[in-house]
Amino acid sequence: MQTHEIRRRFLDHFVRAGHSEVPSASLILPDPNLLFVNAGMVQFKPYFLGQEAPPFSRATSVQKCVRTGDIEEVGVTTRHNTFFQMAGNFSFGDYFKEGAITFAWELISRSQEDGGFGFDPERIWVTAYESDPEAAEIWHRVAGIPTERIQFRDGKDNYWDMGVPGPGGPCSEIYYDRGPEYGAEGGPVADEDRYLEIWNLVFMQDIRGEKSPKLGFEPVGTLPKKNIDTGMGVERVAMLLQGVDNVYETDLLRPIIGKAEELTGKSYGVEHADDVRFRVIADHARTSAMLIADGVNPGNDGRGYVLRRLLRRIVRSARLLGADRPVIGEFMKVVSDLMAPSYPELATDFTRIETVAVGEETAFLKTLSTGSKLFDDAVTEVKATGGRTLAGSEAFTLHDTYGFPIDLTLEMAAEAGLEVDEAGFRSLMAEQRQRAKDDAQARKHAHADLSIYKELVDRGATEFTGFDELATEATVLALIVDGVRVPVATAGQQVEVVLDRSPLYAESGGQIADRGSLTASGTELRVDDVQKIAKKLWVHKTTVERGQITEGDAVLAQVDSAWRRGATQGHSGTHMVHAALRQVLGPNAVQAGSLNKPGYLRFDFNWQGQLSEGQRSDIEAVSNDAVGSDFPVNTFVTDLPKAKSMGALALFGENYGSEVRVVEIGGPFSMELCGGTHVEHSSQIGPITLLGESSVGSGVRRVEAFVGLDSYKYLAKERALLAGVASSLKVPSDEVPGRVEQLVERLKTAEKELERTKAAAVLAEAGSYVEQAQRVGRVLLVAAAAPKGVGAGDLRTLATDIRGRFGSEPAVVVLLGNVDGKVPFVVAVNKPAQELGVRAGDLVGSFGPSIAGRGGGKPEMAQGAGTDPAGIEAGLSGVRARVAEIAA
Ligand code: SER
C-alpha cells in the first residue's frame, strides 16, 4: 500500500468517526522550546492545557515532523530518520482510553478491502503503563488481545510528555511482530527490532513539572479535562504494508536513492560505507525540501544551521560516492515529485525550494575548495615539521568554519598519509554541543517564567479595543513587579499591569507596541511596552509616574495618538513595500520577517543575491505611486481558506486561527493576513524613502525605509549635506557631481605627477651610487640599501642606470629596498662582469636568506622580494663576500 494511501485511510477512518480533519501545521511554530514541530500534538498544545477553547472536540491530522537530535546517526543504521509523518487522532475532553483503543484497533485490524490496514491480529502486541491495568483490560476486552501479548512497562517507555513542563500522560503502544528472522521471542520488552512500534496512544491527563514522570516523579497537576493524543508512524506502517525491510526501501525514499545511484554510478546494497551515504542523501534531501518549503533558509544558527548541515551532508555524501557535478537540484526534484501529492506546496513552490538548495550547494562547493586550501596548508606544515598527525583543532576549524565533516577530513588526511587527532576533535565538538545545550536551557527558563500568568490566562482574554478607539475604561486585573504578583504599586516603581480591556496595541506581527498612559484620579502610569501572553493576555509594562495603583482599580487606558499615527504609517508602509517588492521581483520574494514603528520600517525577504540599483529605485517608485493613489484601506475578518483563495499573503510559520483578519490596500495591489493597525487611506502613509538593502544571512535580504515625516526629515538632512558640499565647492548643487568628478581627475593627475617627480629624484641619485662603488677583485661592486619607499619598478630603473655608467669596467649592482615591511631587490650585472663568471641569478642566494627573500632571473638581471628588512645589512655583507669569492 502506497504511503499516500495510508495517510488517506487514516484520515478517512477518523473523519468517519466524527473528527475534524486539520491540516499539518508548519514545521516551524513560534514555540521557544521547539526547533521544529516534532509531534502531531504540538499545534494542539493550548487546547490540552486549557489556554484556548478548542473549536472541535475531536480532530485528526497527519503532521510533518522533524527530529534532528542525532543527525550523525542517520544512515549508519536504517532506523533513524530526520523527517517523518505522524498520523494522529485527538480528543479534547471527549472520548478517552476506551475510545482511543477501539478506534485504533478498528483501523489496524480491518481488512484492506474494507478500507483498513489489514494487520494480522495474531501478530499485534501492546504495552501499558505499569500502573494502568485499565488500559490492559480494555485491550483484552475490546480487541481480544490475549494477556500474554500485553506487557507492562515503566515510565521510561510508557509515559509521554514533551520533554519540558506541560501536558503529559501514561501511554499504551501498539507493536507488530515481524517474525523470528528479526530477533528474539518475548514481545517488545525483549526486542524492539523484531516487535516494531507503530502507534502510541497517550492518555493525556497530567501536567508535568520540572522533573518528568518518565523518571518516576509525580506530575505537578491534572489537566482540566482528560484528553487523547495518538501518534502513528506513517513510514513504519508503510514499511510493514509494503513488505520491505526498512524505511529506506519504501515508496517515498527508495526513488531518491535510485536518483543518487544514477548520478554517482555506484549501486546501493554493495558496500556498507556507500550505503550510509545513499541513506544520508535520501533522508536529508527529503527533510531539506520540507524545511525550505516551510520557509527555513540555510544559516549559521538555529533552524538555518540544521538545514545548512543537512544540505552540506548531501553534497559531501554525493561527492564521496563519486559525483563530480552539482546534484542538489536533481534531488529536490525527485523529492518534490514524490511528496507533492500530500504536500502540494512542494510543487507550487518548487522554483524557490530549488533556488535556495542550489544556492547553498554552490556556496558549499566554493567553501570546499577554500577549505581544501586550508587543509593542504595544514598538511604541508605538519609534514614540514616531521609530524604525522593533523591537530584536532585544525579538524575542528575545518568542520566549524568550512563545514568539513570529520569523515571528509579523515579521508583526505589518509590520502595525504596523515592521521587526525580525532580525540582532540571530539572534545572540541563536545564543548560546542554543551554550549548549544546551555543555550537551549536558557530558552526553557525564559519559558518557565511565564507560569505566573497562567491563572490570569485561564480567566480569559484581554479585549482589544484599539481598532476603534484610542481611550478605554479598564479594570486592573493584576500587578506584577519583578515576576511577583503585588496588590499595589507606587510612584517610581516599574510594574506590569494586566487589564481586562485595552486600546494599546501589543507587539506582534512586526509592529512594535503602542506607547501611552494609564490614568486615574491622582495616578498616572507611563506605558513603555505592551506584550501579549498566550496570544490573549495584554501585559502593559509601565512606570508609575504619580500616585499609586491597586489591583481592581478602574483606569483610563490611552494610546499616545501621535505615536499611533506614526505606527500605522509604518505598518501600512510595510505592506506597500511588500507589495512593491513582489511586483518588481516576483512571487519568489517571500516575506521572512518585518519590523515597523513610527517613521521606520524594515522588511526581510527570501532572495538570492543583491538587488540592483534599478530594482531598488523601482521598488521605491512603485511604493510611492501606491501611496499617491490614495487607495482606501479595508480590513475584514474571514476564514483562512477564503482569505487564501482571495490571494491574501500569509507569513510562513505563522499558525493562524480559524478566523483571520485581512488588510487590503488598493484591491489586488496589497492583501495580507494581518492583525496590525493601519491608516485609512494610503496617502496618509506619506513619502517612503528606501535607505538601502543588505544581507541578513544566506538567501535573506533586508530593505529599510523611512516613512511619513521621518522620510521628509531624512531627505531634508541629505539636502542640507549636499548644500554644505556645494558651498565648499563654490558651485550650485546641481553642478556638484560634475565638479567632484573633475576634482577626482585632477587628484589622479597630481598623484601621477608626484610619482614621476619621486622617480626622477631617485634616478638623480645614480651618480652618487657610482661614486660609492668598491673594487672587489676585478669587479666594481655597488651593494647598497635604497632609500625607504622606493618600489620594485624604480629600483630596477635605478639599478639599470647605475650599471650603464661603468662602461667596459666589470660591474655588479645590488640594491635592496624597504617598502612597507617588504624588501624588494634587484641585481644587475654588466657584460664584462658576466664574462668573469658573475651571474645575477646566482647572487640571490648570497643575501636571500638574510632578508627571508626569494627570487631569481637571468645572468644580467635578477629580481625578487624578501619579508625581513632587519636582515638588509647582513644581506649586503653576504653579497660582498660572495662577489669577492667569484671575482678573486
Ligand atoms: N505525542 C505522542 C508522540 O509523539 C503521540 O502522538 O509519540
Image (cartoon, rainbow, N blue to C red):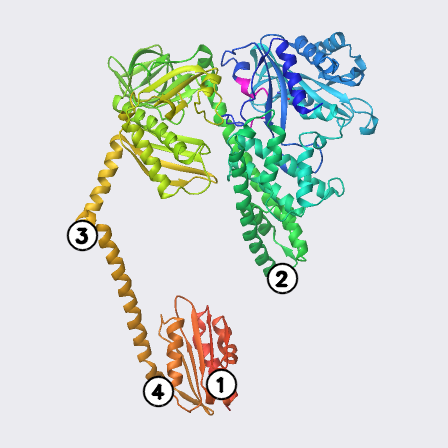
Residue at coordinates 38% horizontally, 19% vertically from top-left? 539
Q: Earlier in the sequence, mark 1 or mark 4?
A: 4
Whole-percent x, y for residue 737 in the image: 24, 51
**Is label 2 in a helix, a strand or a loop?**
helix
Amino acid type indicated by mark 2:
Lys
- What kind of residue is marked 3? Ser
Stretch of the chain drawn in magenta:
36-45
Mark 4 crowd level (few <14, some 14–19, many ≥20, 10 Å Cα) = few
Q: Main secondary structure of the magenta part?
A: loop
Residue tagged by mark 2? 383
Q: Residue at x 51, y 73 (%)?
A: 849
Above or below 453: residue 300: below
- Element under label 1? helix
Distance, label 3 to label 4, CA atoms, is: 52 Å
Q: Residues within 10 Å of mark 2 (few under 14, many from 20)?
A: some
Label 1: which residue?
883
Q: Badge 4 is on which residue? A: 771
Task: Give percent across and percent down for residue 177.
Answer: 78, 22
**Disc 1 crowd, CA 10 A, few/some/many (<14, 14-19, 20+):** many
| Magenta stretch: includes residue 357 | no
View quadrant of ligand 1: top right
- Depth order, front residue of 563/616: 616
Nearest to the observer: residue 285 or residue 811 = 285
Q: Quadrant of residue 713?
A: top left
Looking at the rendered structure, the kind of residue marked 1 is Val
